[in-house]
Amino acid sequence: MPREKIKFALRMSPETQRLVKEMYPRDNCRTQNEFIEKAIRFYSGCVSGQDACEFLPAALTDALRSTVHDSEGRVCRLLFKLAVELDMVMNVLAAGMEIPQEDLDRLRGRCVREVKSTNGSVTLKDAVDYQRGGA
């Protein structure tokens, strides 16, 4: 059952009309009217801020998803390598140090607070300063 259509006058510049005539077949529209309706729906969606996936071409959406997925994989691999290196450093330190459990617990609490307060921006200089009796 076809939807009811409303007829009304539309004024546009000659350049816009040429653009519509040129572009509607390229968008696989059967008529200029279909192209204009699609364009209005697209623009309205962009203005209203709805889900961008409805308006972005499928190829662009797929490319963006793929790029994000690849970046996620790369970050995960780098975090794994970093965790391995950190584990090695901790084991080397633990082998040469005799640290009482209560000191270790206190240090863990302090480090958690430090990482939270600096958003993870901790430097070796900060740790050295703390261990030498600073902050």
Image: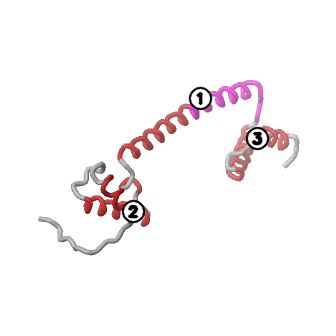
Label 3 near label 2: C-beta < 8 Å? no
Residue tagged by mark 3? 123
Mark 1 or mark 2, which is nearer to you? 2
Q: What residue is rendered at 11% in x and 65% in y?
A: 1
Residue tagged by mark 1? 81
- Looking at the rendered structure, the kind of residue marked 1 is Lys
Outermost residue on the right side: it is 133
Among the 4 quarters of the image, the one containing residue 52: bottom left
Q: Quick check: 29 left or right of 106?
A: left
What is the spatial separation of the Cα atoms under label 3 and label 1, in whole angstroms? Answer: 20 Å
Q: Tell me the magenta residue range.
A: 78-99
Q: What element carries label 2?
A: helix
Magenta stretch contains residue 97 = yes
Outermost residue on the left side: it is 1
> Pointer 1: residues within 10 angstroms few (<14), some, or many (20+)?
few
- Looking at the rendered structure, the kind of residue marked 2 is Tyr
Image x and y of residue 37, in percent: 29, 63
The mark nearer the N terminus, 1 or 2, is 2
Label 1 near label 3: C-beta < 8 Å? no
* Disc marking residue 43: 2
